[in-house]
Image (cartoon, rainbow, N blue to C red):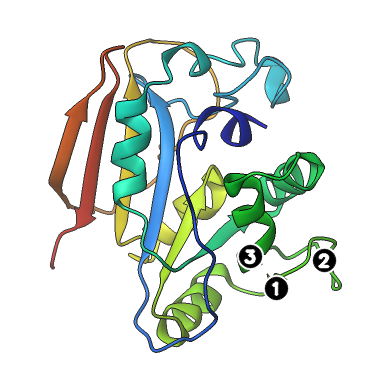
Amino acid sequence: MGWSRCSFEVWTLRGSDGKGLGMGKVVAMEHLTLDGVMQAPGHADEDPRGGFRHGGWAAERQDPAMQRAMGARMSDTWSLLVGRVTYARFWDYWPKQPPNPVTDAFNRVQKYVVSTTMTDPLPWAGSTLLDGDAGEAVAELKMQRDENLVIFGSGALVRSLLRDRLVDEMVLMIHPILLGSGVRLFAEDGDELTAFDLVDSVTTGNGVFVGTYVLAKS
C-alpha cells in the first residue's frame, strides 16, 4: 500500500489515549500530482482500478523535509480515520511488518472506519466501524474526541467530508508531474465554493510542494 511504504519512515507516532474532550480536528494528508491525481502513489500494483498504469509515481520523491512537514501537523494524540479500501490495504500491510515505532503506532492507534458495507467485528485490533451517513458519523465523532482524526488516502471519504465542511485541515504534497489519468482527490461535479487558508509550506529538494491548508472561517 502506497501510504504504508512512502510516508512514515521517519515519524515517531503515538496512539490516542482514548480520552475524548472534544472538539477534534479532521486532518487529510494526501499525495497529489499537478493535475490532482491521488491514485496509487506508492507502488506499481497498489491500485490498478480503471486500468491505471502509473502506480508508484510518488515513491522516488520521498524526502525527509516532506516527512518532517507532515509530522509537524500530527498531535501527540491522534486517531486514524479511513474509508473501507484504505483500511483494507493498511490491515493487509501494517500487522505483517516487523516491530518498529511506526508499525507499533499503527497497530496501537484507535482506528475509525467509515463504511456502509463492512460489518462488525473488524479484523484489526482497535477498529471501530462508523456506518450510516459519513458526515453525521464523523461530525458526532469530532464532538466526542479532542485529538486529530487523521485521514490518509480515502479519496471518497475526503470528498464526502469536504462537501459537509468537516475537513478542518489538509496537508497536500503536490508532486511536479502530470499523469493525465487516474482518480483525482477533488470532485469535478460540485458547485460549492470551499475556501482554505495556506498556513504553512515547504518545498522539498525533489520539487514537492507541501502545503498545509486550514478551512477558512465562513
Secondary structure state at the residue bearing disc 1: strand
Q: Quadrant of the C terminus?
A: bottom left
Badge 2 crowding class, 10 Å Cα cut-off, few under 14, some 14 to 19, many 20 or more, is few
Q: Are marks 3 and 2 in contact (CB under 8 Å)?
A: yes
Q: Quadrant of the N terminus?
A: top right
Residue 148 x %, y %: 40, 66
Residue in front for this viewpoint, 183 or 114: 114
Q: Specify the amino acid type for callout 3.
A: Lys
Mark 3 vs 2, N-terminal side: 3
Could you give the CA–CA distance between mark 2 and mark 1, rounded to whole angstroms?
A: 7 Å
Could you give the CA–CA distance between mark 3 and mark 2, rounded to whole angstroms?
A: 10 Å
- In the picture, the disc for residue 122 is 2
- Residue receiving disc 1: 128
- Residue receiving disc 3: 111
Res 209 quadrant in image: top left
Up-down relation of residue 127 to residue 137 (above or below): above
Q: Are marks 3 and 1 in contact (CB under 8 Å)?
A: yes
Q: Specify the amino acid type for callout 2.
A: Leu
Up-down relation of residue 40 to residue 118 (above or below): above
Left-right relation of 118 to 10: right
Badge 1 crowding class, 10 Å Cα cut-off, few under 14, some 14 to 19, many 20 or more, is some
Seen at 14% across and 45% down, the residue is: 198
Residue in front for this viewpoint, 144 or 100: 100
Q: Specify the amino acid type for callout 1.
A: Thr
- Is there any visible trace of residue 63 in the rendered image? yes
Could you give the CA–CA distance between mark 3 and mark 1, rounded to whole angstroms?
A: 6 Å
Seen at 50% across and 61% down, the residue is: 14
Seen at 81% across and 41% down, the residue is: 96
Q: Are marks 2 and 1 in contact (CB under 8 Å)?
A: yes
Secondary structure state at the residue bearing disc 2: loop
